[in-house]
Amino acid sequence: MPDIATISMLNAHRHKRPTPVLHDIHMTYQTLHLDLQAYRAELNGKTLNLSASEFAMLHLLVRNPGRAFHRADLLDMLWGETYDGGDRAVDNLILRLRKKLGPLGSAIETVWSVGYRLRLEKSSQQVS
């Protein structure tokens, strides 16, 4: 389950309300940097041109690396329960994100028959 800050950001996006002040306003995944307060994403020091939905999806994935999200849950979190456009909207959003992220886009993994996850960084993986 996403944490409270993620849910607040996603709800604010969905209802077009101002985002509440977050304690962790900067997040990093490899060479990707997110500024949650400014709604800015930078990759290798260059600003990415992301839609609000793309930014919300990226934030959700970066905040929860290694966690697989079901398409239906992503639809609900990003667009709300009343969205009736089908789960291809999630697939199209992921496709656009992967393209904008270039080589780093391969870190967004497809979990067949489930949805998507962001691959754990090597330093974050647990050794068994």
Image (cartoon, grey):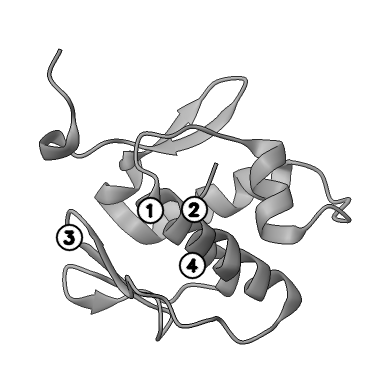
Q: Which residue is depicted at the point 17% across and 68% down?
A: 44
Amino acid of disc 2: Asp
Provide the residue designation for mark 4. Answer: 55
Mark linked to residue 3: 2
State the SS at label 2: loop
Give the left or right position of residue 84, taking residue 17 as reference: right
The residue mark sitting in front, 1 or 4, is 1
Provide the residue designation for mark 1. Answer: 63
Mark closer to the chain start, 2 or 1: 2
Image quadrant occupied by the C terminus: top left
Give the left or right position of residue 69, taking residue 76 as reference: left
The residue mark sitting in front, 2 or 4, is 2
Mark closer to the chain start, 1 or 4: 4
Amino acid of disc 1: Arg
- Distance from Cα at disc 1 to Cα at disc 3: 15 Å
Give the left or right position of residue 43, taking residue 123 as reference: right
Give the left or right position of residue 91, taking residue 43 as reference: right
- Distance from Cα at disc 4 to Cα at disc 3: 16 Å
Rendered view: 99 above or below 17: above
- Distance from Cα at disc 2 to Cα at disc 1: 9 Å
Amino acid of disc 3: Thr
Rendered view: 5 above or below 126: below
Q: Nearer the viewer, residue 25 or 122?
A: 25
Mark closer to the chain start, 2 or 4: 2
State the SS at label 1: helix
Residue 89 pos. (x, y %): 70, 50
Examine the image and state in which quarter residue 13 appears. Answer: bottom right
- Distance from Cα at disc 2 to Cα at disc 4: 17 Å
